[in-house]
Amino acid sequence: VMRFGPGSKKGCGCVVAILCFLLLIIFVFVFYFRLHVPVLVEETFEGGDTGWIVVGDAQGESDKPTYKTEGGNPGAYMSAVDNAVGGVWFWSAPEPFRRQLTSTWKEKGSLRSVLMFDLKQSDITEPFDDKDVILGSGDLELHFFHDLDPGTDWTNYRVPLSPDKGWINGATGEPATREEMTKVISQLEKLWIRGEFRTGEDTGGIDNIRVR
């Protein structure tokens, strides 16, 4: 039979106090981050269709996704249906979004900035791997691969815009450098986010794209 004396209770009390203190630090850090880290650019689709398109085998013969007023995370979002003809389709950011990102990043951003977005898909069977985010400027393309495919409900992604966090030069296959990352963001001509994650027909959605 185990017996706990006054010393054991004191030890348990110390552990609880330490855990509470750590939770407080985490809460303060998250609050500070949200309050003081500026949003460089943001798209929630609450204002309507803002020019995002699909690139690749989706939406039949059109590059225009379907604007949905309900079902997002929350509210409005964009949806696209895979053509299932063997390609991979991506969400492509419009010029105003890219231009604002470039402008505000030069003023307030850094290589510690983070690209965030929410994705979902209609079916999670038969997954395949591919590049998940593409940043491009001229002949320079940087690719990012993440480990988590979206579920049938909204899945949040955080992609650090830092060259040492997994970005690859698409031409050489080598890790991206600080100079390459700085160049591509400061002269951004392409921001693609993968929308297709499985072999066969599916429907994908995107919401809440922001950089901070």
Image: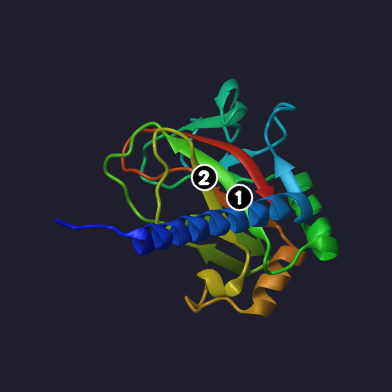
Q: Which residue is mark 2?
A: 156
Q: Secondary structure at mark 2?
A: strand
Q: Residue at the far front: name it.
A: 6
Left/right placement of residue 32 relative to residue 14 reads right
Give neighbour class at mark 2: few <14, some 14-19, many 20+ (Cα, 10 Å): some
Image quadrant containing the N terminus: bottom left
The one of 119 and 31 positioned closer to us in this rendering: 31
Q: Quadrant of residue 33?
A: bottom right
x, y percent for residue 180: 66, 75
Q: Amino acid at mark 2?
A: Asn
Q: Which residue is mark 1?
A: 116
Give neighbour class at mark 1: few <14, some 14-19, many 20+ (Cα, 10 Å): some
Q: Quadrant of residue 42?
A: top right
Left/right placement of residue 181 relative to residue 22 reads right
Label ID, residue 139 = none
Q: Secondary structure at mark 1?
A: strand
**120 over 9 or under it: above or below:** above
Q: Earlier in the sequence, mark 2 or mark 1?
A: 1
Q: Residue at x 40, y 63 (%)?
A: 11
Residue 177 visible in the picture: yes
Q: How many marks?
A: 2
